[in-house]
Image (cartoon, rainbow, N blue to C red):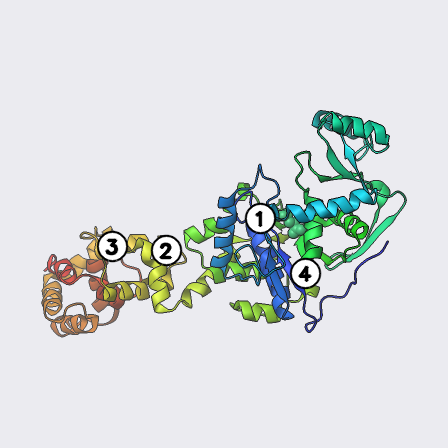
């Protein structure tokens, strides 16, 4: 048996892609990348991108995870043309609502004799598995229930013995397809054990519902994690048995951490939520993900539209893609610099003092933006600018002492007249003391902030509440 074409999608031929998360936890960065690549594949060909929630495993799936994953995708700026919140007649897009379709298709397989009930208990299966492993054989279903007589099957079913439904894998065939990333693939059907398509509780199993949905939803290209590569021959068998058209498949290399191991909690933050909560911007995350396992000659921060134009499936790599927070930080820096003033204010909003007036908030944000990657890094400066009198570092105290009281009485008097305008204050001090350059500005900086270094002084001063600057200067007069 042989299926599917090999060429990457032509820019002109619309492809239908999908992202099919299981709502068993948070949106992992690896899944976010899969979603992104699938959206880009659809957009670059003016195709369609679908969101399907794979929640047939009712024990592990939770609606709160569905909602959270959808919110994270939206926050990233990923958009689907149809999904559980955007039905278009080809859904429903939640597998838990597609039971009737699965039952119909399973009945087709039953009528064709392509499946059979399996009464093996989980304990029996795990013992058989262990025996095979101990003998150095790959574990697969031994076929215990494959050849039960019709009478025996009927007897057990009538007696209510729990049964799964297994797909009868044909013997002696090769299942071949060309993977978009890994090229030609060939699997011997004899290496594939009969697998479960319906669980004992009556729900459709992953191999089955996933493949059937792709076909029924008109998906033409499935791009997913490499961990699914060996599932593909099973899914092709199911589709062939049902007479449904298979999509093309591509399997992207998994994300790994700095140590080369699959990216997991061990490496620190791995969910989109964690990065969002720390103040990473969606543009930064998307730009890092875009270049993980996908090479592009384009430098600089790209918008989703630019990514869609530049995305090239021929440039998907086979080697594991390394998630690198340093690299993410480079994109974050660029994304922060590009924030429009209002967006920057709301990005820093969580660390600004409550009730801060618009003008101070804007000045503070403008001062801090070039100096921080994450809002949390602005917090010490919130304390310095809006809090009590700052403690002077020892070197700063020396600068203040050397400037002397005359310097500061001129500065405080100017601040009383001109408020928080740095050029006016500096002009008055220059006139009174003859100081220039760093000699002129450094004592002002340390008296006002307690530190010799920091964000642009004129902006910090503008952000400081009226009276505070005067008080800080006057204390050394
Ligand atoms: N629900 C599966 C997963 O999250 C989907 C696999 C696929 O994309 O086909 O791994």
Question: Left or right of 68: which side holds 164?
Answer: right
Q: Secondary structure at mark 4?
A: loop
Task: Mark 1 vs mark 3: give the one in front.
Answer: 3
Q: Earlier in the sequence, mark 3 or mark 4?
A: 4
Separation (CA) of disc 3 from disc 4: 47 Å
Task: Mark 2 vs mark 3: give the one in front.
Answer: 3
Could you tell me residue 380's position as x and y percent? 30, 52
- Badge 2 crowding class, 10 Å Cα cut-off, few under 14, some 14 to 19, many 20 or more, is some
- Badge 4 crowding class, 10 Å Cα cut-off, few under 14, some 14 to 19, many 20 or more, is many
Q: Earlier in the sequence, mark 2 or mark 1?
A: 1
Indicate which disc residue 354 carries. Answer: 3
The quarter of the rendered structure image containing the C terminus is bottom left
Compared with residue 282, is residue 118 higher up or lower down, i.e. above or below?
above
User: What is the residue that sits farthest to the front in this orientation?
Assistant: 158
Indicate which disc residue 375 carries. Answer: 2
User: What is the residue that sits farthest to the right in this orientation?
Assistant: 172
Q: Which residue is mark 4?
A: 316
Could you tell me residue 317's position as x and y percent? 68, 58
Question: Left or right of 383: which side holds 370?
Answer: right
Question: Left or right of 140: which side holds 475?
Answer: left
Q: Secondary structure at mark 1?
A: loop
Could you tell me residue 113's position as x and y percent? 83, 42
Q: Earlier in the sequence, mark 1 or mark 4?
A: 1
Q: Which residue is mark 1?
A: 258
């Amino acid at each position: 048996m042989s299926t599917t074409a090999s060429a990457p999608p032509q820019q002109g031929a619309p492809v239908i892609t999908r992202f099919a998360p299981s709502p068993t936890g948070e949106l992992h960065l690896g899944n976010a990348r899969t979603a992104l690549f699938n959206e880009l594949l659809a957009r670059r060909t003016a195709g369609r991108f679908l969101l399907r929630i794979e929640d047939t495993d009712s024990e592990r799936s939770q609606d709160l995870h569905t909602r959270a994953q959808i919110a994270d995708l939206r926050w990233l700026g990923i958009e689907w043309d149809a999904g559980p919140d955007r039905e278009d007649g080809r859904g429903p897009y939640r597998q838990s609502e597609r039971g009737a379709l699965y039952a119909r298709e399973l009945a087709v397989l039953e009528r064709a004799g392509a499946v059979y009930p399996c009464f093996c208990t989980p304990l029996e299966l795990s013992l058989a598995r262990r025996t095979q492993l101990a003998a150095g054989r790959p574990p697969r279903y031994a076929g215990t229930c494959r050849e039960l007589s019709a009478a025996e099957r009927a007897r057990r079913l009538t007696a209510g013995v729990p049964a799964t439904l297994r797909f009868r894998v044909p013997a002696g065939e090769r299942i071949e397809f060309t993977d978009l990333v890994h090229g030609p693939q060939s699997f011997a059907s004899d290496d594939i054990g009969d697998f479960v398509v319906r669980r004992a509780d009556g729900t459709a199993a992953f191999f089955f519902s996933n493949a059937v949905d792709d076909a029924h939803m008109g998906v033409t290209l499935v791009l997913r994690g490499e961990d699914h590569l060996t599932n593909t021959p099973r899914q092709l068998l199911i589709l062939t048995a049902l007479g449904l058209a298979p999509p093309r498949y591509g399997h992207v290399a998994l994300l790994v951490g700095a140590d080369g191991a699959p990216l997991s909690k061990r490496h620190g933050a791995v969910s989109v939520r964690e990065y969002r909560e720390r103040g990473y911007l969606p543009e930064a995350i998307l730009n890092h993900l875009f270049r993980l396992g996908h090479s592009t000659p384009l430098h600089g921060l790209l918008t989703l539209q630019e990514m869609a134009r530049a995305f090239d499936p021929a440039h998907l790599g086979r080697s594991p893609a390394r998630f690198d927070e340093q690299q993410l930080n480079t994109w974050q820096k660029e994304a922060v610099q590009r924030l429009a003033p209002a967006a920057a204010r709301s990005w820093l909003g969580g660390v600004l003092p409550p009730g801060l007036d618009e003008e101070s908030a804007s000045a503070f944000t403008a001062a801090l933006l070039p100096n921080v990657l994450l809002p949390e890094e602005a917090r010490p400066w919130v304390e310095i600018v809006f809090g009590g009198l700052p403690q002077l570092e020892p070197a700063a105290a020396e600068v203040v002492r050397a400037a002397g009281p005359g310097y500061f009485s001129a500065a405080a008097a100017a601040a009383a007249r001109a408020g928080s305008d740095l050029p006016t204050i500096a002009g008055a001090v220059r006139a009174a003391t003859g100081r220039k350059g760093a000699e002129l500005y450094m004592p002002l900086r340390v008296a006002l902030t307690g530190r010799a270094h920091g964000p642009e002084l004129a902006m910090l001063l503008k952000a400081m509440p009226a009276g505070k600057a005067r008080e800080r200067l006057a204390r050394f007069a």
